[in-house]
Every structure is written in structure tokens, then in C-alpha cells.
Image (cartoon, rainbow, N blue to C red):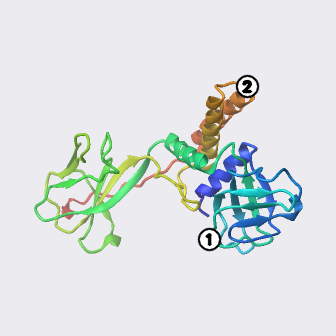
Amino acid sequence: MSYTLSDLLVDALIELGQLNAGEATGGSNAIIYDSTKNGTGRDNSWRGGTVFIWETTDGLAPQGEFARISSSTAATFSLSFPALSAAVDAGDKYGFAGVEYTKAQLVMMANKALKKWGDLDQVDTTLSTSSSVAGYDASAEWDRPYGPSRVDVARTATAYDEGWIEVFDWYFEPGVAGSTGKIYFKTYPYSGQAIRVWYHAPHPRVTTFDDVIDGRIQPEAIVQALVTEALDYNNTKIRGGDKFLIQRQNKAEEDYFTAKMNAPRTRKSKPAVDNHCL
């Protein structure tokens, strides 16, 4: 099962001790009722916080979705929020957190944590060869300081599934600020062959509940990275005045680096070279 943005936020809030868990006793696509919590807190105690639906009885929507809490009531406990894609039913598992870390802040910090992981190997297959053309414009995604790390060309002009051949007679010419670079082949490939460019880039931004976290990133590590970002945010906001938060942040940093160090590494097989494809 894919690890999503929603999973990441829930796991981080649990680590931070910020998530309150519950089981809905009823609801709709814009409200949750939980009679087991009747009389808890005060009206609008949770306004501005975030609610997560992490498990539904049928495994369908709105499972995984989250939203900003617009209001809450205490006597007959309920949380209201902008409409989800389906109704919350009795028995659905949910969690909610207050305004210490808002939905917008959590998503922002999750993307910062993913950037902290560093660049990942990516591939771009948007280019294809043209007759008597040696230079091709770089994609903005892989026109980075070091350019591509590897280039492959499809074996044939018609079938991708016949495999790729790594080629070596190319070089990268970086562009000036505001423009993309170019990749040049020293000899002309046959026309119509797909080009696969390997490059290094940060994880794509995640914004919606079901955006998938790249499987090469260890979930435990990225959770600790997000916890670190959240605690650093809080420590900075209060100018480092809470010793517990500082100690907790230091522990999260250690846990992050340990988890990252122990994460499995991706191994790439190297294909045989066949210069006849050029």
C-alpha cells in the first residue's frame, strides 16, 4: 500500500503528541459526531485545527482525506469542516489536532521535510529523436546544476517495451539564468526514438491527501524529518525558550539520521551497450 501525504501527517502528529483519536457515531460529508466525547472541551475549541479520516468501515472515500476544522461543539460533540468527497459514517476512525500545527503549516513542513531528504533519481521520457537533429531542449525539471546523469534511447522507433539502450555520445550544455540548457548527441540517432533522461531532483511537491510519497523514502525517516521541522518551527516561534521542545527536536534529528542511514538503497542494473541503435 502506498504511503501518502495523509499518512505522513497523521504519523507525525502522533509522534508530536498532537493527535486525538476517535470513532464516529455519525456524520455527513461536512460533520463528524462522536457521542463518546459529549461534553469534552468548549465550543470551537478545535476551530482552525485539522481533522483526518484515516479509516472507513468500507475502505472507501473519505478514507485518507483531511480538512480544516471550521467549528466544533462540546455538548453534543461534533467537528464541522468543508465538504469531503463522501459522508463520514458511524464506525469510521478519525483523528483531529488543534491549531498548534494547522493544515497549511503541516503541508508546508511536509514538503520542507521531503526536500531535506535530498535529491532522488528521476527519469524524463518526454523527448524523442528527430531526423538530423543533434540538440534537444532540456526539461526544466532536469536542467539543474549538474545536468542529466544518464541518457538512454529506445531500441526501436515504435515499441518502448523492446527496452532501452544506454548511450554515451552526448553532452549537456547548461542554460543561462531563466533559460533551459540543451542535451547534444555527437552522432544523430535514428528519427522517432524515445529518449529517456536520468537526472537528480527533489521530491515533487505534495499537496493533496492522496499524493504518494516516493517509495524510496523510508516512512520512519520522513516522519522524523517532519517532526523536526515542526519542533523547529515551534522553537523559533518562542525564540527557543522551551527546554523540552529543544530536547525533543534533538532526539527527532537523531532518529531521522539513524532511519535515513538504515534505509535500503536503490540498486540499478546497467544494460548492455548496443551502438547499433544510433
Q: Residue furthest front?
A: 43
Residue 16, numbered label: none
* Left or right: residue 104 compared with residue 159: right
Is residue 136 visible in the rendered image? The answer is: yes
Q: Residues within 10 Å of mark 2 (few under 14, many from 20)?
A: few
Frontmost residue, 138 versus 210: 210
- Identify the residue shown where x is 71% and y is 28%: 247
In the picture, which quadrant includes the N terminus? bottom right
Frontmost residue, 181 versus 262: 181
Frontmost residue, 108 versus 273: 108
Residue 85, numbered label: 1
Badge 1 marks a residue whose secondary structure is: loop
How far across and down, in percent of the image, does residue 144 sit? 32, 43
Q: Residue furthest left?
A: 132
Q: Residues within 10 Å of mark 1 (few under 14, many from 20)?
A: few
- Identify the residue shown where x is 49% and y is 50%: 266
Residue 243, numbered label: 2
- Identify the residue shown where x is 57% and y is 47%: 110
Where residue 33 sits, quadrant-wise, is: bottom right
How far across and down, in percent of the image, does residue 165 sit? 29, 60
Residue type pointed to by label 2: Lys
Closer to the camera: disc 1 or disc 2? 1
